[in-house]
């Protein structure tokens, strides 16, 4: 593989939508005991369930540490490739490469990663191993790479329709911990050049108490060109209401890159999910400080699903809203099976199914 010194836009490469065909998917095996309660045992079970579902319709690689390699290999089916690769945590969406295509070939984009805010409001230190993963994965897949390590961005903070439109949130991309020296226009230009989009739709915010500074992938996702799902609540007393309403208003008056108005499907959230004292007790401290406090609200949303070739893998929380959420996704993805995975143990880590997966688009010559 080689590092390419131009941009995807200049070379005619673009990021395809997640609902377009995939070559495969990347995940990372969870391990750190201040992210995942009780040493990550329950989280690993959920990750395995998700991995097995995805591997039914695409080629899956799971990266595991030296310590977890044997365990991952034992727990995962033979059709899943397990490679030993070090990382600081398990958020493939955020630091695996963003892949771009020209319709026949794919290349990776490496963004800088600083654990969602570096020393300003980042979530752990160090993050150096995570930050190296995009390069290592491009090597592994033998794909050339655009290196934009000087610009901090996580994959969970962008969604594209593959037809020229990107959606993101101001709360995240304009946060002080990422690229404080850049203006909104500078940031938009990087998105235009490296995702090769014509239009960026800026939502103000995401999900209440989302520790990523409100990644878009927890609040809004394309289900097809000009159609999105938006995390929603009808409870006007919930702080989420004003946040979702603001997104709804923006999306309702916006058009996409092709000038189409956007259909917004409201995907109602579960009742507020809070972490229990027992769960907090299962989390190790970080620098002698607890990483969560009992009663803290977690950023639970059904929008954090992964669109695999043959299935939509979505979280469920044991809430009355689980079934209606599943029904809506079944209606929106009639050609895919909807597989729900109990995701509380992933949510406790700070994200969900979309955050732990990164798709690789199909490319010419793939067997
Ligand atoms: O993309 C994500 N949602 C990752 C969140 C990481 C949280 C670390 N505790």
Image: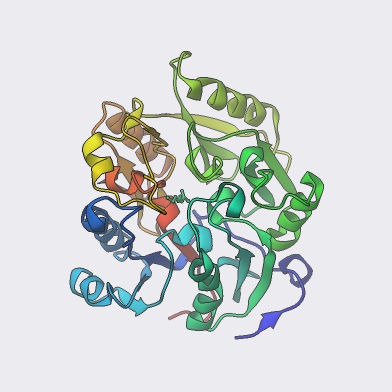
Q: How many marks?
A: 0
| Residue 32 x, y percent position in the rendering | 34, 60
| Residue 30 quadrant | bottom left
Which of the two residues, 254 or 281, is positioned nearer the viewer here?
Answer: 281
| Residue 67 quadrant | bottom left
Q: Residue at x 56, y 38 (%)?
A: 227
| Residue 8 quadrant | bottom right
Mark yes or no: residue 212 visible.
yes
Which of the two residues, 362 or 346, is positioned nearer the viewer here?
Answer: 346
In the picture as drawn, the residue positioned furthest to the top comes out as 237
| Residue 259 x, y percent position in the rendering | 73, 39
Q: Residue at x 40, y 59 (%)?
A: 309
Up/down of 242 relative to 347, above or below: above
| Residue 296 x, y percent position in the rendering | 37, 32
Q: Is residue 222 left or right of residue 256?
A: left
In the picture as drawn, the residue positioned furthest to the front comes out as 288
Q: Residue at x 71, y 79 (%)?
A: 4
| Residue 271 x, y percent position in the rendering | 34, 25
Which of the two residues, 323 or 202, is positioned nearer the viewer here?
Answer: 202
Mark yes or no: residue 49 visible.
no
Q: Residue at x 27, y 50 (%)?
A: 37
């Amino acid at each position: 593989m080689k590092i390419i010194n131009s941009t995807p836009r200049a070379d005619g490469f673009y990021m395809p939508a997640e609902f377009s065909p995939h070559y495969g998917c990347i995940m990372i095996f969870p391990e750190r005991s201040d992210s995942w309660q009780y040493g990550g045992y329950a989280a690993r079970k959920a990750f395995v369930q998700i991995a097995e579902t995805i591997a039914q319709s695409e080629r899956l690689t799971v990266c595991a540490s030296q310590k977890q390699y044997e365990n991952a290999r034992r727990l995962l089916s033979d059709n899943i490739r397990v490679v030993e690769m070090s990382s600081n945590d398990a958020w493939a969406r955020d630091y695996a490469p963003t892949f771009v295509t020209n319709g026949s070939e794919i290349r990776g984009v490496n963004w800088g990663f600083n654990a969602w805010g570096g020393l300003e409001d980042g979530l752990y230190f160090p993050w150096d191993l995570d930050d190296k993963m995009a390069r290592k994965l491009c090597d592994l897949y033998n794909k050339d790479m655009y290196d934009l390590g000087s610009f901090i961005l996580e994959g969970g903070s962008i969604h594209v329709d593959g037809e020229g439109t990107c959606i993101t949130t101001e709360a995240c991309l304009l946060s002080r911990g990422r690229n404080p020296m850049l203006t909104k226009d500078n940031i938009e230009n990087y998105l235009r050049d490296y995702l090769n989009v014509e239009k960026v739709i800026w939502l103000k915010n995401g999900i209440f108490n989302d520790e990523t500074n409100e990644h878009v992938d927890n609040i809004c996702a394309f289900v097809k060109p000009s159609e999105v799902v938006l995390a929603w609540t009808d409870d006007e007393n919930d702080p989420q209401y004003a946040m979702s309403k603001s997104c709804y208003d923006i999306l309702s008056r916006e058009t996409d890159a092709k000038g189409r108005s956007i259909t917004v499907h409201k995907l109602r959230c579960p009742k507020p999910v809070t972490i229990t004292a027992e769960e907090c007790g299962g989390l190790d401290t970080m620098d002698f400080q607890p990483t969560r406090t009992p009663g803290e609200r977690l950023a639970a949303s059904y929008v954090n699903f992964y669109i695999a070739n043959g299935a939509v893998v979505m979280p469920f929380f044991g809430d009355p809203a689980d079934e209606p959420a599943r029904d809506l996704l079944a209606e929106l993805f009639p050609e895919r099976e909807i597989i729900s995975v109990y995701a509380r143990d992933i949510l406790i880590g700070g994200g969900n199914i979309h955050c732990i997966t990164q798709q690789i688009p199909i490319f010419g010559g793939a067997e």
